[in-house]
Image (cartoon, rainbow, N blue to C red):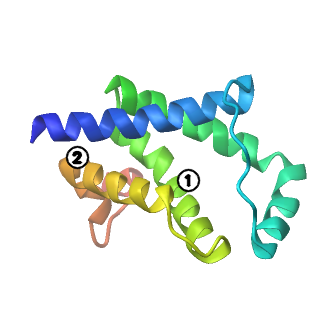
Amino acid sequence: MIYVIAIVRILLGLAFTVVGLDHFLHFLKMDQPPLTAEATHFMAALHPTGYLTVVKVLELTGGILLLSGLCAPLGLVLLMPVIVNIALWEIFLMKKPEVGVVFLVMAIFLIWAYRAYFASVFTCNARSCASRG
């Protein structure tokens, strides 16, 4: 199981590291798939804001953390909102789930694999450290 976890972690980290780097260095020559009308409107709203640059920084940082194995849980925390949005983009705006859903399954698997590090997130009635005295 350790090898499966490592393979999934490296594949997910590599994917986001490469795509994040490509935003800044433009080394991948991929054609844009045709967008639905909804997806076109969504991108038209996001693109001029600089929001996607922040997303790409999160992708790059999270990808490097996963790829390197250093702070893998933190990498998952950074990537999970991005991955959920990719999956939602594919399902609701593009009307066809693809790689985003695969990334989501991979990330959920890794969260399960690192579940001991996420256990405290599910604490009920949590108090701040300042209130503990």
Q: CA distance from mark 1 to mark 2?
A: 19 Å
The x, y position of residue 128, in whole percent, is 39, 57
Is disc 1 placed on a helix, strand or loop?
helix
Residue at x-position 49% and y-position 47%: 79
Residue indicated by mark 1 = 82
Viewer-side residue, 22 vs 107: 22
Amino acid at circle 1: Val
Residue 44's place in the image compared with 22, above or below, is below
For this orientation, the residue located farthest to the left is 1
Is disc 2 placed on a helix, strand or loop?
loop
Residue indicated by mark 2 = 114
Residue 11's place in the image compared with 88, above or below, is above
Residue 23's place in the image compared with 85, above or below, is above
Viewer-side residue, 95 vs 63: 95
Amino acid at circle 2: Tyr
- Mark closer to the observer (1, 2): 1
Viewer-side residue, 124 vs 109: 109
